[in-house]
Amino acid sequence: MPTGGQAPEQVTEDVYRASTRLTGYRHAVLPLLDLGRTGTRRVGDVTIEVVDPVADYAALMESLFDFQRIADWLRGGHRICFDAMHAVTGPYARRILVERLGAPVESLLHAEPLPDFGGLHPDPNPIDAAQLVAASRAPGAPELLAASDGDGDRNMILGPDTFVSPGDSVALMLAGMHHIPGYRAGVPGVARSMPTSRALDVVAASLGLPCYETPTGWRFFCNLLEAGRIGLCGEESFGTSSAHCREKDGLWAVLFWLNLLAADGRTLPAILADHWGRFGRHHYQRWDYVIDDAGRAGDLMTALRDLLPALRGTNPAGGTIQTADDFHYRDPVDGSESAHQGVRLVFDNGCRIVYRLSGTGTAGATLRVYLERHVARAPDIALPTGRAVQSLGDLAAQLARIVHHTGLGAPTGRI
């Protein structure tokens, strides 16, 4: 789209229809070009402009964040560690974090982009970024540790012995937005994908802001951004962004956290603890079940949908199920409908279970089970998240009859 956002379905359908009328195409044979030299040049009938995206991006970030304050914070002895995972954000991090903000070059891990990502899986999560997680748990860990993924659009945020879940991260961004120069005027609203934790909802309610719940997929945020309804959005799969672009932006999120730490003056664990003390903690974890037979995965979801009317109003494991549905979204901007976006079980005691299938096909599928438990007081706030949601996960497996349908007695992975 003109702003760089993902195209809505009606546009992609128009593109498809246009493609059916094509009768041919033209191509140009060009000489070898020096892509390291910016500027516009003409080769035959073709005009070519080479731009420096790193410089453009750095200028945009400097217009949003207080680079001087961050630089002073770093000069004051605070340390960071950014893992580019041998992917695209390496040059951006070097230009901004090292050359502009003054962080030591040793603050960057895997900063050289490599065709095979150096054999790594460039996914910023606790499993694939295990080296960064280990560094956060070591004595004398940096004040901020972060990673971004292969195409630079997702992020993971860590502090000393502290993992910030994506749901908590976007909620804390909203709560601390007044510290950030480019966002002091606030935002018109916020949004999260349906499976993402509801931590953002609580902060938005305290500020009197609308919080939209959308299906998974960034294009749903794009419609809200284009319409000026939101200025901050996030999803559980480590994606966060604002209205400065129409895509997830991993390095933007890292700079937001850097600015927040520099302006707030407290450590990341202290900011997080204070936030939980005020808003409660949304313990959140995703359990993945990799199912070899896609047909059996489909049967599980069909049986679960059939069970929904009977589950409403029941009281399993200490909480009454208030909502039991298959999430259906009507876009408030264009009126488009999106059905079957995930089965939701919402309890009156602050718990929630969401089931979604991912990667369905002839070879298999992954059942994603999202577990959320909101607690308001100690000692529940301090519980390890895995322990806090264990009984909810067991209930989720029991209600969906996961062992019966798949033979899997435990999740394949937990994130």
Image: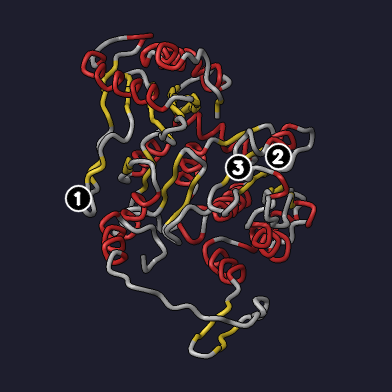
Q: Is the C terminus in the top left, top right, bottom left or bottom right quadrant?
A: top right
Q: Which quarter of the figure has residue 303?
A: top left
Label 2 crowd bin: few (<14), some (14–19), many (20+), radius 10 Å? many
Residue receiving disc 3: 124
Q: x, y (%) of residue 166?
A: 51, 39
Circle 3 SS class:
loop
Mark 3 or 1, nearer chain start? 3
Classify 279 as above or below 79: above
Residue receiving disc 2: 132
Q: Which quarter of the figure has residue 20?
A: bottom left
Q: Amino acid at mark 3?
A: Pro
Mark 2 vs mark 1: in front? 1
Q: Residue placed at 54% from the left, 35% from the top?
A: 165
Q: Residue placed at 38% from the left, 9% from the top?
A: 317
Label 3 crowd bin: few (<14), some (14–19), many (20+), radius 10 Å? many
Residue receiving disc 1: 335
